[in-house]
Image: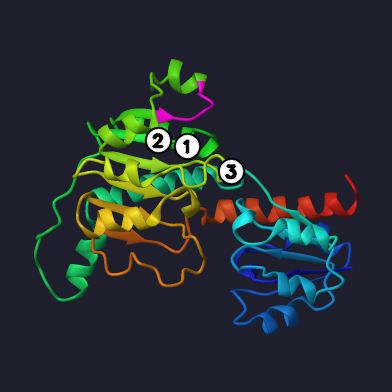
Amino acid sequence: MKSVFIDCAQFVSDKELCRPLEELGEVQYFSEVPESIDEAVARAEGADVLLFCIMQIPNEMLDRLPNLKIVQFVGTGVETFIDIEYAKTKGIKVLKIEGYGNNGVAEFAIAGIFAAARQVGLGNTTVRSGKWTAEGCEGMEISGSKVGVVGTGNIGALVAKKCHALGANVVAFDVFQSTELKDTYKIPYVSLEEIFATCDIITLHLKVNEKTAGIISKDLIESMKQRSLFVNVARAELVDNKALFQALHERRIMGALIDVYEQEPPQGLNFQGLENVVFTPHIGFYTKEASDNSIKMSVDSVVSALKGE
């Protein structure tokens, strides 16, 4: 049996984490995204198992890998990267993992809130360009601000708790309400409409499904306060990104941090050039602790599938 880490070897800090897979057969390791489908197919030639975390897996690639039995996404939100239903027609099982980097993503959301609120991106650009001015860099303090947490699953709940600890007035939205957030932290659940109309900071932590895709609509974005911030470290498909771009371009809202995109790597990104947006390359999950967890969990997932567990 042959397994290939086609684009994620850089996340393997300790080969011992992969030993259960190596005991079952040959394992090859590649870093970074292949430059073409031909290169991707060459890397994965003869593979029974493919592990990936960054690249798109097009149907053509699946067509050209007849031995492939398992595709393991080293992360969550695999639907963004591969056509799962098409893979099924080829007899390929698509696997993912959950919960490997909850705290890392939550901390990154907090970092994003600080970066956007204190104009870190603009300040960095100003100094690097040889200028010395505070023009446009007036910020917002988290303590005392009203923060809306949209989605209070494992990550969103952590973000709500951390914002509460910073002295923010936290409100939340989710279909499934956390008893702990309501009872222990006294965080009320309100409507999406109230969050977008009244909050200074909105941070998004929903999963994408048929009900949530596009849930952050043009109307919601247009209802945001002028000096408000939007943070998305969840999924781009949740948002009407054209409406968000317009709001940012026209300075109808103060700013944003964006870590996720409809296509990764992004193509023709309309947000580029906006000084009030901090862009990051989908790194919310990227800590050593989370990377080690993701590799261990992915290897365990593949081994369990191969053994029929």
| Res 60 → quadrant | bottom right
Q: Left or right of 156: which side holds 81?
A: right
| Image quadrant where one finds the C terminus | top right
Residue 58 in the image, given as x and y percentages of width and height: 67, 70
Q: Looking at the image, is mark 3 or mark 2 earlier in the sequence? A: 2
In the picture, the disc for residue 149 is 2
**Comes first in the chain, label 3 or label 1:** 1
Q: Secondary structure at mark 2?
A: strand
Question: Can you say whether 225 is above or below 29 in the image?
Answer: above
Q: Which residue is mark 1?
A: 156
Distance between the alpha carbons at the discs numbered 1 and 2: 7 Å
Disc 3 from disc 2: Cα separation: 20 Å
Q: Which residues are magenta?
A: 172-178
**Which residue position holds label 3?**
210
Residue 291 quadrant: bottom right
> What amino acid is at disc 2?
Val
How far across and down, in percent of the image, does residue 117 sit?
24, 48
Residue 93, relative to residue 125: is it above or below? above
Residue 173 within the segment the image draws in magenta: yes
Check the image and name the residue furthest to the top.
Answer: 183
Relative to 10, 5 lies left or right:
right
Foreground residue among 124 and 260: 260
Q: Report x, y in % for residue 211.
A: 55, 39
The amino acid type of the residue labelled 1 equals Gly
Q: Which residue occupies 33% across, 47% down? A: 230
